[in-house]
Amino acid sequence: MNNTTRDIADEAFLSEIKLNIRVINICTIVTFIEAELKIGSFQLIGGAVFTSPSVATSGVITSIADVSVVTCCLKCTGISHCTGVFYDGTSAVCQPYHFDNYTSLNIEGKENFVHIVPECEKRGHVFNHQHRLCFDLFTTTLQWNQSREACQDIGGQLVTLDSVSKINFMSDYISYIYPDFKYWHTGASDAEMEGEWRWPNGSPALDIRTTTNETEQEVKDCSSLNRKTLKIQEVWCNVTRRRICEWPNLI
């Protein structure tokens, strides 16, 4: 891969984000995303230059040649004890490393990308960088109000899926983890005002698939994801479903 091709590949995957973290001499903050899933936040930092190569390389896990900086960081995400990578843009050499104290570490001539573990993952939840979703799936079937309370009891809420890309991502994820389970409670409801669907944060919930007709005695005020049709549809609140909880405060 030549430098021009590598630069184009890096630019396509590189985007700036903001993280609530204190790091010495922050240069830029980036996130790398591979397809729909994950997968890692890295922070390019500056700091003290180690004059002794033995000190600076003592935590290097391995060395990989002829890779882009994006591939280099993705390699780190696949190593459980990797805390960052050194990347030499001139020679395209990638060196994943492990240091307990890495925030002031740098080697002259190499970029130092620190692997940032989101608070969501530290709490044991699933974090999707592309959609900024911190979530978990729960397979116990409950009524909608019970599902909402169950999410709230563990500090979360029923999930907000307010875009086609989020719906597609979640449907694909569920299909991979639980291929036999079709319906999942989501956070949209029009219980407060019939016909005005809203997500837990108060934002309008558009494109809810409605099926209620005038002959039905009980309106459908709650919602669920149908991962087969890729739609959020209205359901009776007493219908039992599995649930998707999310934690917006942990992203």
Image: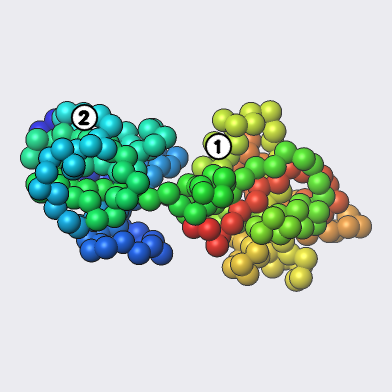
Task: Give the residue at mark 2.
Answer: 63
73 lies above or below 123: above
Tell me which residue sits at (62%, 45%) in the image. 136
**Residue 206 percent location from the top left of the image:** 60, 60
Relative to 199, 43 lies left or right: left
Left/right of residue 12 with respect to residue 162 in the rendered view: left
Disc 1 packing (10 Å; few <14; some 14–19; many ≥20): some
Q: Nearer the viewer, mark 2 or mark 1?
A: 2
Per the image, the residue denoted by label 1 is 173
Q: Is residue 192 visible?
A: yes
Numbered label attached to residue 114: none
Q: How far across and how far down the image is residue 11, in percent?
A: 22, 47
Figure quadrant of the N terminus: top left
Label 2 or label 1, whichever comes before in sequence order: 2
Residue 236 left/right relative to 6: right
Q: How many marks?
A: 2
